[in-house]
Every structure is written in structure tokens, then in C-alpha cells.
Amino acid sequence: MNINNNMKLGLIAAISIIALFVLSLWISQTPANDDNSIRFGILTLLPPLVAIGLAFITKETILSLFMGVFVGEFMLCVNDLNIVSTAINAFLQMGSQIISCMADPWNAGIILQCLLIGGIIQLVTKMGGAKALADTFARRADTPRKAQLFTWFLGLCVFFDDYANSLIVGPIMRPVMDKLKVSREKLAFIVDATAAPVAGIAIISTWIGLEISLIAAGFESVGVTNVTGFGIFLQTIPYRFYNIFILLFIVISSITLYEFGPMKKAEQTARKRKENEEIIVPNAPGFDEVKPVEGIKLSIWNAIIPIGTLIIGALIAFYWSGYTTILGGEDQALIAIMKSSPLSFNGVFTALSQSDASVALFQAALLASIVAIVMAVGERILTIEDAISEWIGGMKTIVITGVILLLAWSLGGVIGDVGTANYLVGVLKNTLPQFIVPALIFILGALISFATGTAYGTMSILMPLAIPLAWAVGSGDMSFTIVCTSGVLTGAIFGDHCSPISDTTILSSMGTSCNHIDHVQTQIYYAIFVASVAIFIGYIPAGLGIPWFISIPIGVVVMYVGLKILGQKVDFDEVEESSS
């Protein structure tokens, strides 16, 4: 066995050295160019392909991301055929890249708020709030159908931020789903599908500021100044076909209990579990091992108050962040709104659209942490030392997620340096018939987002290119340009939804204590199915002028029929009868 392992390691090392040598030879022969997307050409796809491919093959997320970052840095460091010095330089640059990502205020805020939310969840669990809340939900959501629909509804309620959605809804509903023998993979899918798809179309969210600013800048670039970014954003909502269809697909799947692909197998496995059987999920960080303090009286308020503080505190922090940013800025129109009607709908929306989401969520999570600690001590459930210890213990469960996020962001930075997105845009933006442009923009956005793992970055890259392209192809047709704008926003979310290196996908796995690669493998079939409906029933007809109110009902019917054809009902009747 040892000999075989040594032979495998030696073979892997030999293949890696040969591959790096060939890569060095290829790159060193390319002419120097300031634009790396031109210099590297198709090789720009290598870093994300290595990361994504290894993730599926090895099921080791950290190793896969590490190798993707290393390959990208190796490409950037190639000057000659000396692969040893190139590898050393790549390793050093990789360290700088990771530190740079950690030092970024937005990234630091996201990691800190994730750590704090982990601490809150552990405290809520130790106080018995999570179990009390789960028991309350279980009495109402007492069948697999109701539980899945209830999870979907909670996802809609946490509409303001996709990160908060993943970290709040998952831990709350996991005990309920486990009791009803619904798989962790299905829970992770519902949580993930109600995170970015909901936040992306909500008119009050951490996404909308970026979205409307990109839209406004895009229309200004083609000389259209008589529209507002928010006005165009509202007009894109009916054409956000993937977002709408994926939310409706959850309802159809939950009601029919039909599943297909790897999700069907996951659900069948979960259905065969024995009553009260311990669920062991390899490589799935979470809070499963945490139990309430023995002998305490369970109260749902021990969950509602800390989590409610987190949600309400986040909304207030979003508003205050935007309010102070506007008053400290130079945009007199926005300042006038804040001074004249700060609490009107327009004032609240304007403030939220200018907020710093990472800072606001961190502030809300810190406040909720203090509230949870005070409650635990005040109710004499824990001493102050034990409460702080449990809070820190909850943070430890999130450390692995922080490592994955840092590597994912580092990979995104390397991908930007090698020019992956620019290469894809250059390849796919050739002259096309008008009707296919919205669908192509959707697909291009999905490819960039899948490869880079970021919807925000994809929107920022593609919007300045897509709006002028749509305006030119459509000869200034505003309706056509709006459909294409929707394709950017929605395609970015679809690709992000599928990508194993997406931070939202990672957080959804963590929040539901689901193996990350299992989550990706089960979810991607559903995402592609819904995206196909969005393309053929949504964007191609929209490019031909078919209105959305015709496409959406047809799309719902197609999803229902397709699920019936491709899927099979996973029998939960016995569970539902015993629950009733």
C-alpha cells in the first residue's frame, strides 16, 4: 500500500513538473503585451479550470483553491524556462495576494461578520433558543413539503443580504430538515437559491447600490442621461428570468417532491435514515456538536431576540452607513434628499443604496453578540466566562470558511490579473443576430461568474460592455437594452450560484453543515435546468420582442413538466403520516 502511495505521489509530482515546464515554454514564447488576456490567450482559463476541476476530482476545496491561485501566480511570474525560480516567485506572490485580500476592508468586514455570526449561533444553541425555535417550526412545518416551503419563505424574509441569508436561515432550519429526513444537500440548495437570487432583485438590499450605479454609468456611456439607474433597475425585474424561475422551481420541487440527478440520490439516502440516527457529514463545518445546557427551560426568545437584533440592527446600520456617507460626500442632490426627507421611502432607499454592507453587517453582528452574551448571563444559563468562551468557540467553527473565502478572493484577484474575463468577452462579443444577444449576454455573464466566483465582479466587468453592445445592436431600442441589462445581472447570479469557488455557495454549505462539493454537485444540475428554461423560454423570446408576462407562465409550465419527466418522486408519505 505504501509503495503504491509513493508511486502515486511520484507520478503526480512528475506530471506537475512536466506541466509547469510546458506552461513555462508556452508562455515564454508569447510576445510581451500589456494586456494579459491577449498575451496568455486561452491560458487565461487555466487558473479557474484547475481550481474547479480539482474541486470536483479531489473534493478538497482548500487544496483546489490553493492550486488555482498558485497556477495563476506561476503564469504571471514566468520569464524563462527556470521553473524553480518561477515557482518560488509564484509562492511569494501568492502570499502577498492573500494578505492583500485580507487587508481589503470589504473582505475583512465579511470575514469578521461571519465569525461573529458563528459566535451568535453557538450562544443561541447553548441557551436552547435554536432547539426551541426548531421545535416550534417543526410543529408548524411538520411535513417535508411544509419544511421546504417554510425554508423558502424564511429566505425571502432575509432579503437584504445574501451572506446574512445563508448564515441565518441554514442553522435555523437544519434541525427541522434533519428530523423530517430531508437531505442537507436539499436544504443547502434552498438556502443558496434564496440568497443571491432574492438579494439581487430586492429594492432594498446590499446589492442594489452597485447594480444601479453600474446601470447608470452604462447608459451615460451611450449618451442616455434622461433615465435613472433605479428606474432602469425596476424595469429589469420582470426580465430577471433566472432569479424568478429558480424561486418558483423551489416551490414546484417542494410541493411535488420530485427530484432528479444527484439530488435525487441525496434525498433517497436521507429518506432511508433511521429515526434519531446521528448524521455525519465529512468535511462539513457547522454547529451539530453543540447542545443546549442541560436542565434549562427552552425559550424561543433566546433565539428570536439575538437573531432579531442582528436583522433589525443590520437594516439600521445599513441606513446609518449610507446616511453618513451621503452627508460626508459632495453629491448635493443626495444631500438634499437626506436633509429634507431622510425617512421617506426615497430617503431610506437612497441611504441603503450608499451603505457599506460589510461594515454594517459587522456592526449588527457585534451588537447581536453583546445581546446574546448579556441574555445568557442574565438568565443564569452561563457565566460571563462561559458565555464568552462559547462565543469564541462558535467563531472557531467559521475559521475554515474564512480560509476558503480568502483563497476564493485570492483566486478572483489572480484571475483578474491574468485577464480571464476580458478574454471571454473578447471571444464571445462578435457580430450576432439581435435576438440572440440577451441570451448570449446571460451566458457570458454566467461563464465569467462561474470562472471567477463573484457576481459583483462579473457585473462590474460586463455591464460597461453589454449596455453599449445592446444599444448598438438594437439601434437605440430602450426595451431591448433593458432586457440585455437584465441578462448581465441575472447571468452573474446564475454563474455565481453554480461556482464552487463562490463565497455565497461556500457560506450556504457552511450554514447548513453540508459538504461543500456535495452541495455544488447536487445544486448545479438544478441551476442549469432552470437556466436553460430562462434562456429558451425567457431571453431568446425576449430578444424577439415577446413580453415577460407571456414567458414567465410558460416557463413555470415547462419547469413543472420537465421536473416530472426528468425526476422521480422521493417517497416521504410515511414521514408525513407519522408527523400528522
Image (tube, rainbow, N blue to C red):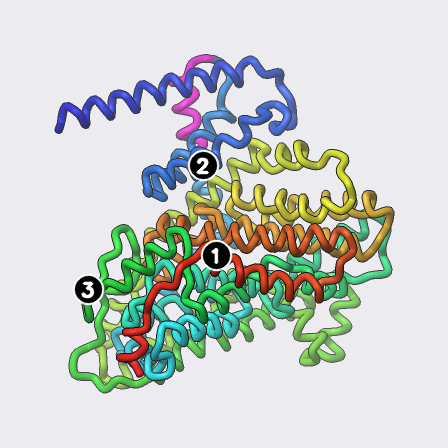
- Residue at screen point 71% across, 36% down: 429
Tag 3 near tag 2, CB within 8 Å: no
Q: Amino acid at mark 1?
A: Ile
Which of the marked residues, 3 or 2, is nearer the chain's N terminus?
A: 2
Badge nearest the viewer, 1 or 3? 1
Q: Amino acid at mark 2?
A: Ser
**Element type at marker 1?**
helix
Q: Residue at x 43, y 39 (%)?
A: 52
Instruction: Determine whether the residue tagged by mark 2 lies in a helix, strand or loop.
Output: helix
Which structural element holds mark 3? loop
Residue in the picture at 59% in, 54% down: 533
Give the residue number, with chain letter if any, for mark 1. 565
Snapshot quadrant of residue 302: bottom left
Q: Is residue 421 left or right of residue 430?
A: left
Q: Earlier in the sequence, mark 1 or mark 3?
A: 3
Above/below status of 529 relative to 167? above
Q: Amino acid at mark 3?
A: Glu
Q: Identify residue for label 3.
A: 278
On the rendered image, what quadrant is the C terminus found in?
bottom left
Residue 338 versus residue 485: which sits nearer the camera?
Answer: 485
Left or right of residue 519: residue 101: right
Residue 347 appears anywhere in the view: yes
**In this rendering, the label closer to the viewer, 3 or 2:** 3
Label the magenta part by its dominant secondary structure.
helix
Front-most of 469 and 142?
A: 142
In the picture shown, does residue 568 fall above or below 365?
A: above
Write down the residue under mark 2: 96
Q: Residue shown at 65%/55% (left/top)?
A: 537
Q: Which residues are magenta?
A: 81-93
Residue 272, horizontal then vertical, whole percent: 24, 63
